[in-house]
């Protein structure tokens, strides 16, 4: 057990330098797309997060299949799915969310709040038609009018709440993209388990997915200090989950399986 723990620390150490480069590219992505808007950033998240899930599923299922040659298809599907969805969700969604909360980038400025309130007041104003004859409302009409009034009162609060950060879980909210991506990766691993994919690519795609999750919830001007904080968040969000997904997780379910020796540039399944 101590030997495996030491091997895990060795893997993390050797993957740290490239993860730093990946985090730097994530910061660059945020600089390029910081004014693109939540919808565009969500679309980009919908590209990179499923891509991360595919790669994670390939590596996880391939390692497990090659080390446990008697494993059934169902077992490989379960391990591959849980490893890919679980780790990618932590890396691309959960850890960035906590980073956003700590950094405060998702807290709207007073200017943004006033802008939304002003837009609501402008839309709420309606010209009074003095020429419309008086029509007596029945009880049903009074109830409908009262309901609309309460809805109008609650709307500014809902708009303000929509400005704040929230945890976007891809496998739930974008289930039609993320879950098929995991199954695709498992299928690739089943037929081509000796597939080799650069760990560098895995790190970059995961970093970009995390970056766009942060941008989806960003409502403040990103200062140099905040970018330093974002760099740290991206590094942690990618470094631990990706190494665990590519190396540790699948081998936890294989008896007497050694941990892979470190590959600074590739997460390769054994040949």
Image (cartoon, helix red, strand yellow):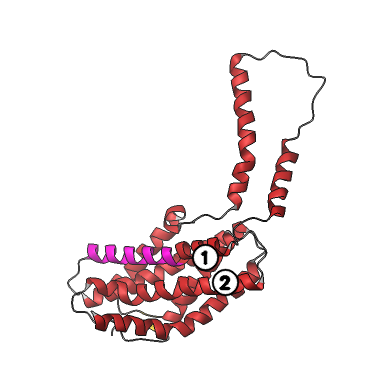
Magenta residues, dominant SS class: helix
Q: Relative to 209, is 251 on the left or the right?
A: left
Magenta-colored stretch includes residue 80: yes
Q: Residue at x 70, y 44 (%)?
A: 117
Q: Relative to 134, is 23 on the left or the right?
A: left
In the displayed structure, 225 sits above or below 217; it is below
Q: Secondary structure at mark 2?
A: helix
Residue 198 percent coordinates (x, y)? 42, 81
Q: Residue at x 65, y 73 (%)?
A: 224
Foreground residue, 42 or 191? 42
Which image quarter is the C terminus in?
Answer: bottom left
- For the record, the magenta segment spans 73-91
Q: Residue at x 60, y 23 (%)?
A: 144
Q: Is residue 192 visible?
A: no
Q: Quadrant of residue 53?
A: bottom left
- How far apart marks 1 and 2 lie (CA) works out to 8 Å
Magenta-colored stretch includes residue 119: no
In the displayed structure, 123 sits above or below 92; it is above
Which image quarter is the N terminus in?
Answer: bottom left
Outermost residue, right direction?
Answer: 131
User: Which residue bears the numbered disc 2?
Assistant: 229
Foreground residue, 235 or 268? 235
In the displayed structure, 21 sits above or below 161; it is below
Q: Relative to 65, is 224 on the left or the right?
A: right
User: Which residue bears the numbered disc 1?
Assistant: 99
Q: Are the two marked residues, 1 and 2, in contact with CB atoms closer than 8 angstroms?
A: yes
In the displayed structure, 242 sits above or below 104; it is below
């Amino acid at each position: 057990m101590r030997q495996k723990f030491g091997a895990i620390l060795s893997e993390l150490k050797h993957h740290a330098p490239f993860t730093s480069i990946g985090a730097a590219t994530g910061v660059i992505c945020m600089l390029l797309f910081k004014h693109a808007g939540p919808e565009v950033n969500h679309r980009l998240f919908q590209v990179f997060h499923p891509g991360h899930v595919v790669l994670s599923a390939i590596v996880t299922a391939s390692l497990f299949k090659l080390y446990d040659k008697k494993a059934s298809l169902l077992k490989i599907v379960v391990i591959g799915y849980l490893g890919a969805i679980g780790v990618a969700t932590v890396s691309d969604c959960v850890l960035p969310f906590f980073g956003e909360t700590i950094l405060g980038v998702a807290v709207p400025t007073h200017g943004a709040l006033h802008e939304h309130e002003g837009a609501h007041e402008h839309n709420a104003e309606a010209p009074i038609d003095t020429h419309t004859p008086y029509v007596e409302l029945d009880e049903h009409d009074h109830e409908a009018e009262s309901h609309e009034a309460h809805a109008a009162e609650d709307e500014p609060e809902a708009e303000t709440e929509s400005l704040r950060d929230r945890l976007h879980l891809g496998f739930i909210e974008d289930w039609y993209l993320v879950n098929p991506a995991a199954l695709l990766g498992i299928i690739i691993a089943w037929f081509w388990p000796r597939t080799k994919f650069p760990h560098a690519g895995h790190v970059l795609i995961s970093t970009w997915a995390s970056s766009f999750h942060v941008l989806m919830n960003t409502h403040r001007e990103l200062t140099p200090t905040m970018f330093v904080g974002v760099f740290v968040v991206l590094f942690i969000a990618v470094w631990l989950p990706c190494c665990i997904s590519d190396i540790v997780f699948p081998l936890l379910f294989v008896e007497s399986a050694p941990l892979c020796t470190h590959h600074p540039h590739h997460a390769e399944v054994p040949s």
